[in-house]
Amino acid sequence: MKTLIYAVMGLFTVECLASNKNENTEQQQWQQFVNRYSKQVETKLKEKSIPGAALSIVQGEDSYFQKGFGRTKVKQGRKVDAHTRFRLASVSKTFAGSLTAKLAAEGKIDLDRAISHYLPQARDSRFENLKVYNLLSHSSGIVPNAYDNLVESRMSYIDITDKLFDIQPICKPSICYGYQNVMFSLIDRVIKAKTGLDYKTWVEEFLFAPLGMRDGGVGLENLTKDKNFAAPHVLGRKRWHTARLKSNYYKVLPAAGVNASAADMVFWLKAQLGHFPKVLSLDALTVQSRPYVQTKRELKRRIWRKHVKEAHYGLGWRIYDFEGTLLFYHSGWVQGYRTDIVVIPSMNIGYSMLLNAESGLINELTVEFIKKAIEWKETSTADAVDE
């Protein structure tokens, strides 16, 4: 009997050691991959003379990488570090989607309820029966980018959003996709009407604070609260020039009003992977990743079109079939900034890239990361099977 017990114990020990060895090998391969990718990023940023960038990569609950590149300004700027704030532009939409999914999962908002239930202005309008989820999935049925021109004017947020109810739809809700900033940001007024708290408070106190995101927040004042923020840059005569920081799109906070650092994005990526269930529960993550509407135009994007087989939009998140791998994605672009975020749940991997320059290089960097990450996973899985 003792011999059998010792044999079982020995077998268990050998299996544990083998398991630990596999895990250590996989982690080493991951670190090597991340280090190689980081060096490639640095090289390409220098080739394009990109002023500054911030990279965040997460794998699992404990493994992460965060790094700043370049400077906050092309002239007399400080070095970008892991705590330098960038405008997220439309990557801000992922915060709106996740927050609303959180509120829905907690029973504070009904996504299937008509917005007229929350907003009296919508009653007796063409959008009386528009659902809350239509706002966040760009499926309201109106012409794309409606009233973006007014966002760039002096008109107030309230006045702009009130004008939405006079628009003639081009299709019924949930039938066609039309990317929005103003209609999307109407979720701000819905949340405040239902909960009594404004959008900024919800994001900063119920997402940023409990996740430990200490650098960024919502609005222009947050971005410029100290000198450690990345200034915007535009290309002119083949050179990058520091541009004037514009406040226009901070009017539509849910659509484009969030700021974050590389360190902040690490926590945001972990939350999206389910590692902060008290902040974003599995129910909330499931709600936000439901494919509400097809986005066929995404299948034609340069660089991406070779890899994306299906494309949908959830709540504030794009949903891609990337060569058979399901991933959640969003990009951002306001004057002087480009941003990307990627979450690959099946691989427990998250990624974000923030640039303080309007450069298409970000597409190349992001697609390259996804391809290499999938290759890494396939290789590490094959090695584990062989052993």
Image (cartoon, helix red, strand yellow):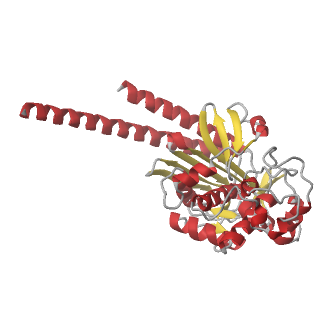
Relative to 161, 267 lies left or right: left
Asked where in the image residue 380 lies, by quadrant, the reply is top left
Task: Say whether residue 172 is visible.
Answer: yes
- Tell me: residue 331, above or below residue 243: above
Relative to 337, 11 lies left or right: left
Asked where in the image residue 367 lies, by quadrant, the reply is top right
Task: Say whether residue 228 is visible.
Answer: no
Relative to 83, 367 lies left or right: right
Residue placed farthest to the top in the image?
386
Give me the residue at 46% from left, 40% from top. Answer: 30
Q: Quadrant of the N terminus?
A: top left
Q: Position of residue 334 (x, y in %)?
A: 77, 57
- Tell me: residue 190, above or below residue 310: below
Relative to 312, 40 lies left or right: left
Count the marks: 0
Give me the residue at 68% from left, 44% from top. Answer: 291
Q: Position of residue 178 (x, y in %)?
A: 82, 48
Q: Quadrant of the C terminus?
A: top left
Q: Position of residue 56 (x, y in %)?
A: 56, 52
